[in-house]
Image (spheres, rainbow, N blue to C red):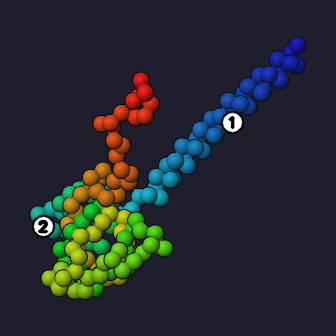
Amino acid sequence: MVEGLSIICTCIAMLIFQSIADYIKDSRFIHLQGLTKEEKVPVIRGKFGLTQSVSIWDVVAGDVILLSSGSKVPADCLVINSFDLQVEDGDADDDQLEDEQRKEQKGSIEEGGDPFLRAGSIIEKGSCKAVVCCVGAHSTRGITEPRLNTQNDTPLQAKL
């Protein structure tokens, strides 16, 4: 009887310790996953125009950001100043990437380049200074799927 009870207690203790270890491991993994999405972008803020690095999650509408080649556009932006800027639309598939989906700016906006940058686009070449227009759910990154039409009844509701 004592041996059976000690075996059961040992199994329960091992189960509890293993559950605690798995919980700690999972919470560390979630924390590390969050850090991989953490990016910093140089932002000009304040009345003195000082540049500071800010997390992409802390960027607000009206911030002036500095982007260079290899940077990912954190939000929908309007280009203020650019030099030899070439941008690849981040939402387009490589198979469907056509000339109209590539934007090219040479020099500045005054020379006729497209001044709007979509969230998720990648700066292939050049650099620019842009003002953030839309962030979060209001940006093109936040609009991932079309909204459901809730005005009309579903086929199941129509039968009732």
Q: Identify which residue is drawn at 37% across, 64% down.
A: 120
Q: Identify which residue is drawn at 27% across, 63% down.
A: 76
> Looking at the image, do the residues carrying marks 2 and 1 touch, with CB atoms under 8 Å apart?
no
Q: Identify which residue is drawn at 27% across, 52% down.
A: 138
Q: Which mark is residue 18?
A: 1
Residue 105 drawn at (x, y percent): 26, 82
Q: Is residue 112 left or right of residue 143?
A: left
Q: Which mark is residue 134?
A: none
Give the amino acid type for the residue marked by disc 1 in the picture. Gln
Residue 48 visible in the shown view: yes
Q: Nearer the viewer, residue 117 or 40?
A: 117
Residue placed under numbered mark 2 in the picture: 48
Q: Quick one: SS at disc 2?
A: loop
Residue 131 drawn at (x, y percent): 20, 66
Q: Nearer the viewer, residue 82 or 89?
A: 89
Q: Of marks 2 and 1, which one's residue comes earlier in the chain?
A: 1
Q: Residues within 10 Å of mark 2 (few under 14, many from 20)?
A: few
